[in-house]
Image: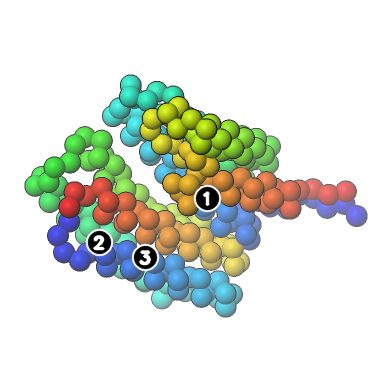
Amino acid sequence: MDGPLPLVLLVASLLFAAVVLVYVVLDRTPDWGLLGFAAVIEALTLVLLVVAAVQVGGVDLSGGRLVTLFGYLVAGLVLLPIGFVWSLAERSRGATAVLMVAGLAQAFVVVRVMQVWPS
Amino acid sequence: MSRAAASTSSGLGRALVAVYGVFALAATARSLVQLATKAGEAPLAYALSAVAALVYVAATLGLAEVGPNPRRLAWAAVGFELVGVLTVGTLTVLDPELFPDATVWSDYGAGYGWLPLVLPFVGIAWLWHTRARD
């Protein structure tokens, strides 16, 4: 995939998970800042999905790998929203840590997208 | 002093449910892609992937306290998961040809950072920790 977008998204997802870890350690509950950070990642993931859809015609991707690619991209769109819904229903360190799980899973999704995309 | 069972989806359990949820999502998606695109290539491995996906979904729902008897569902799923990862892990180490395509439990889950091996132990410990006591 052309451009730095996947790498930016990967770094942002890992950074998000690291920030959540700080929140968990300090026993702080998620705030608007964290939600805004997640919204930026969500928007970038949507852009990545559109870029992939536009560029996919020009690369060699067979049926199974094509389904895998867009499966991961769609998963990347739902991870953080579901994570926030599950996390915000409770106020506890464990509930905040849910967002860390979501951030790491998001990073994993981006890595897999980069691997599946033919270079 | 007796104490009712604690919630399995509260506190630390909330994060555990999230991890199980990610595995349920990943295993289900992987299984659907395998069955839809190349079911005939490695039927045993792909059937196993589907079973693993169901086990993760059941464990997620059980620990998240969905359904009529979630604790029993969680115990059954996490127990099956432990037996599954140990059995499939051992078989794949002894005979790598048995499953031509990797499953989540191959080589004790080494392809997934050993998490599939660690998870059932954490799940059982958590169910034990939150059990009713008398």
Q: Amino acid at mark 1?
A: Leu
Q: Residue furthest front?
A: B94
> In the image, what residue type sits under mark 2?
Pro
How are the residues colored? Answer: rainbow
The amino acid at mark 3 is: Ser
**Residue tagged 3:** A13
Q: Give me the chain letter of mark 1.
A: B
Query: In this rendering, would B120 be left or right of A23?
Result: right
Q: Which residue is mark 2?
A: A6
Across and down, in percent, residue A107 comes to 37, 60
Query: Residue A75: where, in percent of width, then height?
Result: 35, 49
- Which chain does the residue under circle 3 lie in? A
The answer to whether marks 2 and 3 sit on the same chain is yes
Circle 1 Cα neighbour tier, 10 Å, few/some/many (<14 / 14–19 / ≥20):
some
Secondary element at image label 2: helix
How many residues crowd mark 2 within 10 Å: few (<14), some (14–19), many (20+)?
A: some
Instruction: Kindly indicate the quadrant of the structure image that contains residue A16.
Output: bottom left
Disc 2: host chain: A
Q: Earlier in the sequence, mark 2 or mark 3?
A: 2
Residue, x 62% and y 55% (percent of image)?
B13
Q: Which residue is mark 1?
A: B115
Is residue B69 visible from the viewing direction of this image?
Answer: no
Mark 2–mark 1 contact, CB under 8 Å?
no
Secondary structure category for the residue under label 1: helix
Residue B68 lies, in percent from the top left, at 65, 36
For this rendering, which residue is in front, A97 or B113?
Answer: B113
Residue furthest right in the image: B1
Cα gap from disc 3 to disc 1, whole angstroms = 20 Å
Q: Is residue B17 visible?
A: yes
Q: Secondary structure at mark 3?
A: helix
